[in-house]
Image (spheres, rainbow, N blue to C red):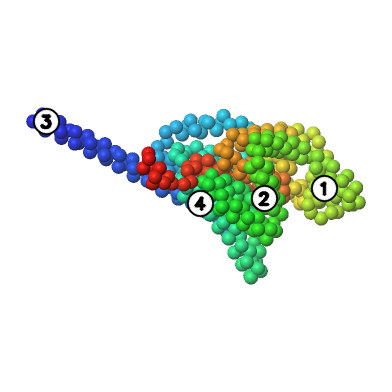
Amino acid sequence: MAERVGSRAMTFGAGGARSRRIERDEAADASRFFARIAYAVLGLGAPVGVVIHPLALFVIFPIGVALILMSAILEGPAGLIDRVLRAFRIPAFVALVAGLGWAMLSVLWTPYPVSAAQHALKLALLIAATLLAVAAPRDNARATDLYLFPIGVVFGMATMATMGLAHILTGAVDQAGLASGAVALAVLLFPALGGLTARGRNGYARLLLILALVFAYIDGYAPLTVALFAGYLALSFAISDMRRTARELAWGAAAVVLLSPLIPAIAPTVSAWIFHAKLASLPPPYAPLSVAADIFTHHKLRLITGHGFETVSRGVRAAILPPRTPTALAFTVWYELGVIGALVAATGLWFAFRDIGNAPARLAPYMAAGLTAVVALAFLNVDFNDMTAMTLIAVAVIATDVAARSQYRTTRPSAAILANL
């Protein structure tokens, strides 16, 4: 009788363990399913949606982040707090938070406090959502999830080509959608290339690289061409010597940010020497430099603290600033946040480029190229104020995280090796 009861208890115990194992397997399958859908939404939806409708990206991004968090909850959120707090030990992220804090503090003296507070809140939510999307997953990323981002870049180029052809046939031109798509290509290309290279798909990476270069030449959008050229240049140097390239890019980017006001300061003199004309009388992009020179020399004391967050965009709309006022992020940082904001930005870029040297060897050159392309866009006439470019950068960060978490095994072991094992 005792043996029968004991065997029945062992049967029940084995059945309970089996049921718990089945529940864990089902939760893991559901977690992988939600992660796959999330990366499909971000990887495929972001580069396509930003071309089709200006608000599509702001619907796609929160859906993708929410699905990533649901996947992490099903997987088990153990260690999430530690992974989130780990980001605050990264100097570049600390500089980013410090810059956001200074922007929030400038609400006290900006002429547009309500608009500035709203914009700062949007940036804070974007940073928090990106941090959670990067810190939530625990397992390695699967190859299928990784390939969604390069496919999305190709889909984005195809969407831009289709829309451009439709515009030629119908005569209706949507320059905003095509410009946003070009920015998406410049921002998302190098993380996609890094993911392909991390999986050993070097042939596909080269093909995508050539395809993007040809598309940029046909598209003719100057910021896209300049950003891709800067990224290609950084990539070529980084592949040969990553440590030295990261160090030189760190110092170069920091110096360019800090010395950028010298460009409009000396531009009138250079214009008189070379063109024998005033800077304001020249065609773009020289005329905005004239406006920047007048603004910088008119309010020298305000260069220390800046005029306050959101001053440039709102000032142009209210006709307080000239309509040709530059919208480049580098000018905006100097004018709105002053020397303090520029120092924080330069410090963050220095740490970001320096730390790329410690990234995985296959991925590091493409991370350097991607960050270089973003820095190039910051000095061009690309509007970072409408949050589109910032959200695309957040998608690029998530794509880079997926590439870093991917399994670097690119070939299956042969049957002979398995037999020897």
Q: How many numbered circles are shown?
A: 4
Q: Amino acid at mark 2?
A: Leu
Circle 4 SS class: helix
Instruction: Indicate the quadrant containing the C terminus: top left, top right, bottom left or bottom right.
Output: top left
The alpha-carbon separation of the residues under discs 4 and 2 comes to: 21 Å
Q: Earlier in the sequence, mark 2 or mark 1?
A: 2
**Res. 335 visible in picture:** yes
Is 160 or 112 nearer to us in this picture? 160
The residue at the point 67 percent across, 45 percent down is 236
Q: Nearer the viewer, mark 2 or mark 1?
A: 2
The alpha-carbon separation of the residues under discs 3 and 1 comes to: 95 Å
Mark carried by residue 3:
3
The alpha-carbon separation of the residues under discs 3 and 2 comes to: 75 Å
Q: Earlier in the sequence, mark 3 or mark 1?
A: 3
The residue at the point 49 percent across, 42 percent down is 408
The alpha-carbon separation of the residues under discs 1 and 4 comes to: 44 Å
Do tag 3 and tag 1 residues touch (Cβ < 8 Å)? Answer: no
The alpha-carbon separation of the residues under discs 2 and 1 comes to: 27 Å
Circle 2 SS class: helix
Residue 375 placement (x, y as % from top left): 68, 43
Residue at numbered disc 4 = 148
Q: Amino acid at mark 1?
A: Ser
**Res. 395 visible in picture:** no
Image position of 9 (left or right of 344)? left
Q: Nearer the viewer, mark 3 or mark 1?
A: 3
Residue at numbered disc 1 = 290
Residue 417 placement (x, y as % from top left): 40, 42
Image position of 61 (left or right of 232)? left
Residue at numbered disc 2 = 228
Q: Earlier in the sequence, mark 4 or mark 3?
A: 3
